[in-house]
Amino acid sequence: KKCKAEPQAAEKVLENLNGSWRLIFTTGTKKKQDEIKGTVNYFPIKAVQSFDTSTDPFGIENGIYLGDLNVVKFAGPFDFDLVRRKLEFDFTSIAIFGFKIQIKPSDAAKIGSSTGLGSESNVKNSNKGKRPFFNWISADENIATARGGGGGLALWKRIEAEE
């Protein structure tokens, strides 16, 4: 509501997203909560999302690490709806241990769903031509919060890019 009443609030969220963020906490998707009869809390695997608003189109990367070793990294463009604070994205490449290949957005949704890194709803939405998304609640200089397309809530901490 604040962003609808104060459009500059959404602009500030987008501006603050620029950079790298480590996933700290997630409730998991609604389906995952039902499966485990609870919520996921601390996210023990190093997962880093980076947003670049200096490019056209804007860019997103999502990396999964074992320690400091980047195992898999998805990358692609994103759009940001200032009225709804909705960030919609497509992953158009995947790098596994640094070996990069181009993929279709529907491939990323299937990989995410099958590994638990994404929601099954992303596969269904991809088949309908819809993109995965986050509805951003907040983003400041240190902390960002959003609800994903699968219904889960997530909390990120800003980090330096090489962290």
Image: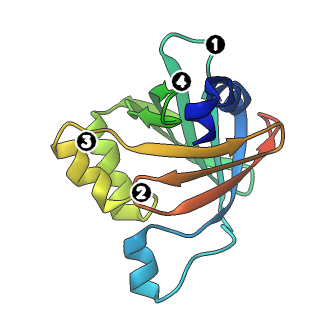
Q: Nearer the viewer, mark 3 or mark 1?
A: 1
Q: Earlier in the sequence, mark 2 or mark 1?
A: 1
Q: Residue 126's x, y, as percent?
A: 23, 43
Give the CA separation, mark 2 to mark 4. 18 Å
**Label 4 sits on residue:** 59
- Residue type at mark 4 is Gly
Q: Residue 136's x, y, as percent?
A: 58, 43
Q: Pointer 2 and pointer 1: residues touching (CB < 8 Å)?
A: no
Q: Pointer 2 and pointer 3: residues touching (CB < 8 Å)?
A: no
**Label 1 sits on residue:** 54
- Residue type at mark 2 is Gly
Give neighbour class at mark 2: few <14, some 14-19, many 20+ (Cα, 10 Å): many
Q: Earlier in the sequence, mark 2 or mark 4?
A: 4
**Label 2 sits on residue:** 118
Taking the image as shown, residue 129 lies to the left or right of residue 83, namely left
- Residue type at mark 1 is Ser
Q: Earlier in the sequence, mark 4 or mark 3?
A: 4
Give the CA separation, mark 2 to mark 3. 12 Å
- Residue type at mark 3 is Ser
| Secondary element type, mark 2 | loop
Q: Pointer 2 and pointer 4: residues touching (CB < 8 Å)?
A: no
Residue 61 sits above or below residue 52 on the image: below
Residue 145 sits above or below residue 62 on the image: below
| Secondary element type, mark 1 | loop
**Label 3 sits on residue:** 106
Q: Earlier in the sequence, mark 2 or mark 3?
A: 3
Q: Residue 155's x, y, as percent?
A: 68, 56
